[in-house]
Image (cartoon, rainbow, N blue to C red):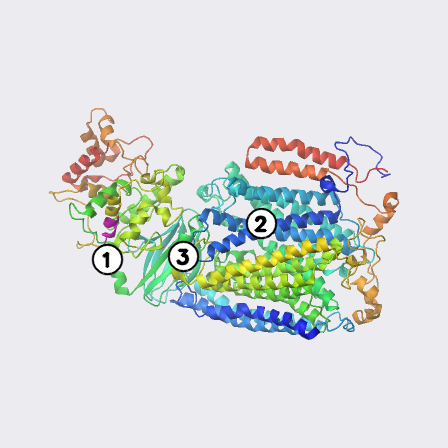
Amino acid sequence: MTTNALTFPRFFPRPQSETGIWGWIGTVDHKRIGTLYGITSFLWFLIAGVEALLIRVQLASAENTFIGPEFYNQLFTMHGTTMVFLVIMPLSAAFFNWLIPLQIGARDVAFPRLNALSYWVFLFGSLIMNAGWLTGDAPNGGWFGYAPNSGVTFNPGLGMTYWVVGLNILGVASIAAGLNFIVTIMNMRAPGMSMFKMPVFTWMTLITSVLLVLAMPILAVAGIQLQTDRVYGTHFFNSLAGGDPVMWQHIFWLFGHPEVYILILPAMGIVSEVLPTFSRKPLFGYPFVVFAGIVIGFMGWFVWSHHMFTVGLGPAANTAFAMSTMLIAVPTGVKIFNWIGTLWRGNIQLNTAMLFSISFIAMFTIGGLSGVMHASPPTDSQQQDTYFVVAHFHYVLVGGALLGIFSGIYFWWPKFTGWFLNEKLGIANWALMMIGFNLQFGPQHWLGMDGMPRRIYTYAENMGWEGSNLAASIGGFILGFGILLFIINMIYSRMNKKIAPADPWDGRTLEWSTSSPPPVHDFDEVPQVKYRDDFWFKKHPETISEYYHNEHDLVVEEDAPVGADDAEEHGDDHGGHGGIHLPDKSYYPFILGVGIAIFGIGFLTNTYVIAAGVPIFIWGMLGWSMEPVNDPT
Amino acid sequence: MHRVSKLPVSLRTALLLIVPVAVGLLAACTPDNNQSTFGTAGPVASDQADLFIFIFWIAVVVFILVEGAVIYASIRYRRRSKSDKLPYQTHGNDKLEITWTIIPVLILIAIAIPTLTDIWEQQNGAPTDRGEVLSVEAIGHQWWFEFRYPDHEVITANELHIPVNRPVGFKLESQDVIHSFWVPKIAGKVDMVPLNDNYLWMMADEVGEYYGQCAEFCGIAHAHMRFRVIVHTEEDFNAWVAGMHTASDPPAAGSAEASGKTLFAGNCSSCHTTNSTAPGSYAQEISSQQARWNGWVSDIENSGIVSAPNLTHFGTRSTLASGIKDLNQESLVEWITDPSSIKIGTRMQDHAAIYKTADGKAKLTDDEISDIAKYLLSLKPGSGTTDQTMGASTGGDVDAVELFTTNCAACHSTGDDKIVGPGLAGIGDQAGNRVDGLSADEYLEQSLREPDAYIVDGFTPGLMPNWEKLGDDSIDALVTYLKTMK
């Protein structure tokens, strides 16, 4: 780079390898990082699934002795923690990484090395969090780690320390990723793509990223306090020394409720792409769907205490949070109605991706309706901490977030890999998942109303809970077989290599305008955007007047970004890519990630280990800051 | 062909949506289940169930409309052939948007009104217009429930007795972690949070026995933290209270119960009180319970004492180990022998000295365990008068073990553990060496008659009552008994 006249001491050679393990460790390509996120979180998904199946075996009959309470408590703690932090969040991150630059017509994210750092920190955090399985000391305090049961007095051993140290490390990854995508979306859109011409998935990513940047620091506050409570004997939440256990709940859920929208908004973004594509119609009421997302993201901050209706906050607080919680159902409903409006009078192709998206609407609606039931504190007092709540959040997070993610995988798989997935296997995969899911979680509503508390490893024969539990366990295994078919489908796709064209679905957004899989620089030419669903209207110009009634809708807004122009400005620095500016590979994100991981290990073992992490951390930071983004050529 | 191949998929979608509804409607017909929130037995739970059903039917209507629209659109507008012409590329419809924003708001207002009424009726203290409120303090412990009746000076555990058709005002506390107090058929749950007392009122309108269970994850034995609520008629409730103030008849000399009583005094009585019937015993049990907790929490690894349920009139209970098992000789023997065979994680087995064995089972013979069980099952209101004095003797035979159990065991263990006072293991050997010039007999007698004359290092003066009131015979008997502790 010509502007970079100074040469700095090099701590490490620039990675050269494109392939092999060093190629992956040094990569800063958003697509490869997306793949790393996808593969890692899918492996955690399988582990969390095995944990869930062990739980279902144990609960299949009354007074079962298959698993004891120690192991059971570890299983449900890690199933929840893994699904939230190591599966749905990073699977969404895989989509952000893969799609955001492609959807906005950029060549990478704003901070490619920071992006790589996010992944490595996520990987190390997830490993530390699960390290307890190897030492027989896995976390066992529940995924929301209520104090004082998560403190050392009642929970000695390393279990919950693995959990809290892991969470704190994962938080670094999420905050960095959130910042990265905010800057990318705000600054790097293709010329002409004003905010209200962005794809809805990009919008939902933006809102999710803002939530991540605001919510994860709150979790970090609680996490660091719990960590020092456990490691250094502070008393933030230790009620035996006057610490306040209710404070933990407030801080945790002040993070935790926005977190729910962090989990669901990306899936809402995905179905908002899939439904229009396979209805061959634009998203119905685009601005309303976008604003509903923004309103949900905003109101999500005012409802946290509905997780605490039975904590005894008093009638005034419960009234206020009941009202705000009911209100948040309105924008959620608006989204559902607009998705149905998108289907209406469409030309609907019921392929696997579409079936998953339609099922998302159907299942998420059930989760939403049960949500309204426990938005009412008097009803909630019978439902809180029972299987009714378990059913509710699985309808939202499996029936919602995961079905959306599966829809997205089937939709974008050809774009990611260049091959099709098999449709017959896909539909069987969908059908088994739907049957299994409903058989597993449908009856749990009634177990809850029948008084079965959650997180109990056994129950008495005379409670009348056996039939529903057996059904739920059978459903769990059917769901598991459905996911097995998905794995087979991926392998089949890899072996069969049925080549996908650039635009297999008659897509609407920019990612379909480039080859499948996209070249390393994403677009040979930076696209010029004129319309919402620009790619569609360029393919079908005769339909422009149906969507845009007024001439002034077509005037290019003043806020059209300039980011892509920057790339052109510096483009000729890089003959190698035909005038395309791409960041060079770097090992430093990985090294910095290792440093952060060693800090975490220090909290688990010995304070001196933390000191050992310092030089590695500094090496990573210094090397990173002194290494130019691109070597002079 | 297209129609045939597409339709089953759509039908399957329809069927899948019906499954949860059908299962639900079938399962909703089980109000008789022990913890069903539908077969209610009190106004609080019944209002909550009514509100649920109100919201449920609104949800059913919304469910049918939304899912119906999804299924209809998916079938009606499905692609029939590749040559279908493009649908109209509509951008949306503002009037529709306004409609489907306002209608949910109206529905939610309809739900909010009864919600608010119920919140302020149920969460704003016990009603004053439904009869005299019975006060109960319910305390969550890992993993059992303690119930105190401050107006009646009664303490019991795991089985709550209340009168029918009278509001009961609960003060909910926790000594350790967060628990949740829940009797599904009578009222929704409220958490028991350490340092944050909560309040809950409920009222039962049917006599009977109801199931309760801890609903907040509280550690290893959470699944086994249950309790029962026994709803009496007003007369029966008063009789129960009177019974709780009537001492048990002492077991006949030489009986299995008598042997069990001695074994209990030696092995169990540091943690379990069996005779909180006399005046003053209520306050004493509260301070002993606190002392046991302090003892455990100050040395969690090695403490020989833990918070433990009060066993007064244990023989009248119907369940064992916080509502897990029916109480009888067989289950009680199993429990005493190896508590974890019934309830994994119970603190008794981790801390009581008799379980410090290789296999964790009690180091007692089968006969001894059977005797303890028989003794405990014999604990019922006796034929004696209520308000018995605290074991004061009237001359003649004095049962030193009974005296010790009644008056001393709450604060002194027979082992090495501190409760409120020092453990008494080896006191028979040491008593003669404590104070220069006092023999063992003199030292022990002085300790009973003038407790503050000599305080063992590390203990607080002024806590131990003066036991002159027991009378000379009793004091002599206690001294003799204490000297046997080698």
Q: Chain of mark 2?
A: A
| Numbered marks: total | 3
| In the rendered image, the vertical position of residue A91 relative to residue B66, given as above or below | above
Q: Are marks 3 and 2 in contact (CB under 8 Å)?
A: no
Mark 1 or mark 3: name the one nearer the start of the chain.
3
Label 2 or label 1, whichever lies nearer to me, is 2
Q: Nearer the viewer, residue B367 or A318?
A: B367
**Tag 3 residue:** B213
Element type where label 2 sits in the image? helix
Q: Which residue type carries mark 1?
A: Ala
Q: Label 2 to label 1, Cα distance in Å?
A: 58 Å
**Tag 2 residue:** A47
| In the rendered image, the vertical position of residue A9 relative to residue A112, given as above or below | above
Label 3 or label 2, whichever lies nearer to me, is 2
Q: Are marks 1 and 3 on the same chain?
A: yes
Q: Which residue type carries mark 2?
A: Ile
Q: Nearer the viewer, residue B71 or A432?
A: A432
Quick check: is A28 in the magenta stretch? no
Q: Which mark is residue B384?
A: none
Magenta span: chief secondary structure: helix
User: Badge 3: few (under 14), some or many (20 or more) residues near its Cα, within 10 Å?
Assistant: many
Q: Which residue does the image show at 52% across and 36% down from the upper left? A: A232
Q: Label 3 to label 2, Cα distance in Å?
A: 31 Å
Residue placed furthest toward the front: A496
Q: Are marks 2 and 1 in contact (CB under 8 Å)?
A: no
Q: Which residues are magenta?
A: B373-380
Q: Which of the 4 quarters of the picture holds residue B472?
A: top left
Residue A364 horizontal/vertical position (percent): 60, 64
Q: Which residue does the image show at 50% across and 67% down from the upper left? A: B115
Element type where label 1 sits in the image? helix
**Tag 1 residue:** B242
